[in-house]
Image: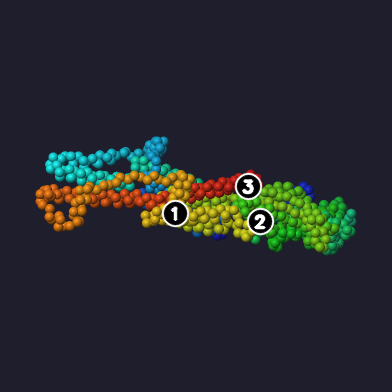
Amino acid sequence: MGEWQLMEITSNKIHSEEIENGIYTDKLAFHIKVRRRATLYVVNLLIPSCFLITVDLFSFLLPPQSVDRSSFKMTLILGYTVFLLIMNDLLPATGNAIPLINVFFSLCLALMVASLLETILITNLLCGSADFAPVPHWVRVLVLQFLGALVCLPQKTKKAKDSDLKTGTVVAKGKADEKPPGVENKAVQQLRNLSKDLQAIRLQVEQQLNGRPSSEEWIQCCPLKVKPSKVLFIFVSLLMHAQCNSVMLPCSQPDTPSLLAALQPVFKLRPIRPVMNLSTTTNVTIDFIMFGILGVDEKAQLLTTFIWQTLHWKNEFATWDPEECGAQWITVPRKLLWVPDVVINEFMEKNSAPFVPYSYLYSDGVVLDAQPVRVVSSCRLDIYLFPFDIQNCSLSFNSYLHGREAIQLDIHTSAEKIFQYSKEVMTTMGEWELIGMTAKKLEPSSVVDNSGHYVELRFFVSVRRRATLYVVNLLIPSCFLITVDLFSFMLPPKNVDRSLFKMTLILGYTVFLIIMNNLLPITGETIPLLNVFLSLCLGLMVASLLETILITNLICGSAHYSPVPRWIRVLVLQILGKLVCLPPKPRVKKDTVFQNPAVLEILEMKFASPVAEDSEGPEEKGPLSEDEALQELENLSNDLQAIRLQVEQQLNGSQSSEEWIQVGFIIDRLLFILYILFVTVSFMTIIIIWVIFYNNP
């Protein structure tokens, strides 16, 4: 039995009646119930998926201050898409209904993407909060106080950091009377300069490590976002795991054998058209019921359907008196009767449906011939709006040999009734849905052949693609990945390797396109709008990656660049900067550190000539121990001033370097705005097309 297990077989007898022809038919229906063996799918699909979801859940424990959690989650999403690629053959592909496991996988992917976006936001707060405005009062109250208490993360108390900065001054004043006035003034001045340099270095380091108070408050909001995310993650995961004018025939006796014997001369006349006069036209009426839409081949431009075709015509050789012959109708082998050569012009393959060997023959000479037909017909397919496309195909019935003078074709039942009954009995539609049917009779003036005039009945069949499968498996994941790439602009390029993140995202997107390649139609006539959308998305991802590489180059290497040209400063810094709300930064007036003139004088004396230093008398130097202490303080002060200048230059950079970095940020913001506009317009266009598609079938 393989994958399937037989559970039960039931049967019932169905009585049906065709009122028009007075034919009663009995149907015996067998219902076979089978169950899929789920062990293979649980082991190969559900359990690995739960493992990956669990890994994503535990990734919230990674400290975002010291670990690049966004790259970890992006790699996890890439691994999940590769897992879906490997397991793609196990998933059923059908458009009639979306399997619940597909919904589960989509929710898992959505949760991973949501956690990645939340991680990007937290990384932005941790690394860029120093440049933010102070936390608004409502955010401080709502998030830091209420939500903080709710998730057991109360607001941190503010510590007094300025108390230690005055210690040096107090110590210096405590011993003011222990030294001579001249030495005291020099020593105190050097100690004050030393204290200022130490305080500046300390403030720079503390601001770099801890940030401003508003920065700490923004960072305090991060764990508040993480903990509810973990709770929501666990809750949704638990929810996911919970539980379609003739001669009368003489009859010797009123029974079937005598009627069959009387019909023997009629059977011998089957090679000719059943009319007494060849100038008489045989009227053939056509009717059919569409039982199933088996598929559409976009590449070969073929529509495959299964219909039950019914033909009605009159055989003038076969009429009898029902009372004399004892029967109103009789079933006879189809090969014993003349059958009109009605064909479907769009036929591309031989009919492979089961052959029905019998036809109905009525007492008035009417013949009813019903045959199942598997129609593989050519159809001009327009897939520009894929997967929201509607295809209009035609089925043209006409006689292959007989012209208008011999056979007239008419519709037995209206196209509206054919459509309604087909909708009721249709059991196989799969990806496609029958939404309409019309019919038109083409007069002989429209269809002309060299051998004569032919009558043609043309039925126009409208089918609509069920787009839910493609929305769930194509559009929504693609939108997720585009949203991730959009939010990646929030990653600070100074602290996070954004280029590696985007490269991983592009790799995941290409893997996703490989997975979904079988869902995309293949045709050379038109390009679906969805393919254009996916290509533009990939193009935007590549453009954002190139822009990230440019910004990284400007941030890391701008210190060695020449000053920004004037046309770039005007075009980018002034015009585009104001356009994207990043005006040029005002030049900060930095505190200039002036060295003590006495120190400069001593240094000059020190490096000028050792002989000059030795020629001075002891009375000019003062006490030896005091001069040595003062000299050490001066050297220490010079070293600290040099360290301070290096720290400030490292943190602030040169003016040209800051301008190049500002150019990079403006380009980054401009591409971010263009990205938002494209994604918004694309999503709105898809939604509008979808709404119009379903409201106006």
Q: Is residue 138 above or below residue 327?
A: above
What is the x, y in percent for residue 6? Answer: 58, 55
Q: In this view, does 559 lie to the left or right of 105?
A: left
Q: Which residue is depicted at the point 15% across and 45% down? A: 183
Which tag, 2 or 3, sits closer to the chain's start?
A: 2
Q: Residue 697 carries which label?
A: none
Q: For this view, does 39 lie left or right of residue 616? A: right
Q: How crowded is mark 3: few (under 14 residues within 10 Å), some or many (20 or more)?
A: some
- Among the 4 quarters of the image, the one containing residue 247: bottom right
Residue 548's disc number: 1
Q: How far apart are marks 3 and 1 (CA)?
A: 39 Å
Q: Which amino acid does label 1 sit on?
A: Thr
Residue at screen point 31% across, 49% down: 648
Secondary element type, mark 3 = helix
**Residue 50 at x, y percent in the picture:** 45, 52
Where residue 81 sits in the image (x, y, percent)? Answer: 49, 55
Give the residue at mark 2: 381
- Disc 3 marks which amino acid? Phe
Q: Can residue 561 be seen in this view?
A: yes
* Pointer 3 residue: 693
Label 2 vs label 3: CA separation?
A: 17 Å
